[in-house]
Amino acid sequence: MSTPLLTLFSHHAQGGLRERLCATLRQAIAGGHLTFGQKVPSTRQLAGDLGLSRVTVEAAYAQLESEGYLQRETGRGTFVAIVMPAQTTHTTPADRPRFSTRGSAVIATGGCQDPPFPHAFAAGSPELRAFPHPLWRRLSASVQRTHGSQLMGYGDPLGYLPLRSAVADYLALSRGMHCRPEQVIILTSSQQALQLLAMMFLDPGDEVWLETPGYPGARNAFLAAGARCRGVPLDDEGAIVQCGAAKLLYLTPSHHYPTGVAMSLPRRLAWLGWAQRHGSWIIEDDYDSEFHYDDRPTPAMQGLDRHGRVITLGTFSKSLFPSLRLAWMVVPPGLAEPLGQARSVMDGHSALMPQAVTAAFLQQGHFASHLRLMRQLYRSRRDLLLAQLRPLSRWLTPITTPGGLQLTVRLKEGEEAALTALAGRNGLTLPRLSPLATDSPAQSGWILGFSALSPGEIAAGCGKLGALFR
């Protein structure tokens, strides 16, 4: 409690010690560091902290009590007795900062913002109320008891080895991937993975191809690196193979974002052949392959790669919880070491304790059990959302998808931007579809998140949505 006083008090200022301590206390109260009703340090404690005699502190407290700043209560202590009006600071506007070309490009993207508390219809959030919190607490305590200080130091930039091994096993069994633990890199997010790849592979002016419409976070990462982004159109089989070459190709082949199209096997093989011919890298974003409801998810594209041209990434933000800040990336063997070195200069490594708890969660079979429950829950919510949207078919056309955490709807009537703004004023979040287009005609619509919403919240949200048109 005496920390602000230690900062503000000076033994070298002019005036006696009592006067200086009185001035310091007044300044702390006026500046809001000490507020009405807050207990201040005892005379013994403050004297020891500031290196003053207790007589000096006692005299200062008595002076401020007489001025009305403090109130002393026998047996309880000394308290702030005055409410100070809020201070208004008048500062001269600073010159507009001059950022680098890359910094300006980052700002121009608008950043990547996710709501901290999902509501209708914020997209991409898991249902945290159904997470096994007691189990996670027990695992955390067990890991802390077992490893203790071993997990409190610096870690491997590539990630905690037991977690890398658990991820490699899971991906081999569930996604048909060919990878060893030394090919797995643990990161804080898939966005960090994209930024790392952009930093390592792209020079200003290099061309990157992305699906259109597509994930804006990927486009932002590549634009920030100075790349030229070209949109790749889609059909019912996924992204259409193009003529020409690019340094990087970004795909979501198992469940296209945002339409949900799964790329066919012939199309996957065609893109792999394209990458081999041109020496290009394919970034496969496996962002929500755990959540397929109507059929089995198609295996990862990486499992078909025979020439080491595919880099696959995924995240635990959707399958576990966002604040865990853990993601994974599987790279060809020759890339792991240099990417690990590059990661070491970005943020060093991911926190070891969450990695160890997540490793235990996977190794003990809890991850698979949790995913089974979430698939059942999310499927029921998707079906409910589709049913609630049927009365709005005059205005909206849902794009039926076999999985995912959100549902894309195309807008038939009305202006997307105006309706979105009106929805916001009425408590609805409607992520727009049109900004996801890259140099192609934009489609009007919304991406409606449903996974984090209860049945009642879905029904209420659809009621508000219908009111926009009626």
Image (tube, rainbow, N blue to C red):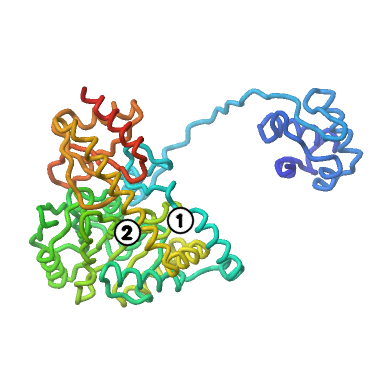
Residue 35: give its label.
none
Describe the element under mark 2 as helix, strand or loop. helix
Q: Name the one closer to the observer, 259 or 152.
A: 259
User: At x 23% / y 74%, what residue is drawn?
Assistant: 308
Q: Is residue 121 visible?
A: yes
Q: Position of residue 295 (x, y in %)?
A: 20, 58
Q: Position of residue 252 (x, y in %)?
A: 22, 57
Describe the element under mark 1 as helix, strand or loop. helix
Instruction: In the displayed orientation, state which residue is furthest to the right.
Output: 55
Q: Name the one closer to the observer, 39 or 30.
A: 39
Q: Position of residue 212 (x, y in %)?
A: 17, 50
Amino acid type of disc 2?
Answer: Leu
Q: Position of residue 147 (x, y in %)?
A: 58, 70
Q: Would you identify the image quadrant in which residue 71 lies? A: top right
Q: Would you identify the image quadrant in which residue 52 lies? A: top right
Amino acid type of disc 1?
Answer: Leu
Above or below, comparing residue 447 to residue 168 in the picture? above
Residue 194: give its label.
2
User: At x 35% / y 53%, what residue is drawn?
Assistant: 374
Q: Nearer the N terminus, badge 2 or badge 1?
A: 2
The residue beneath circle 1 is 324
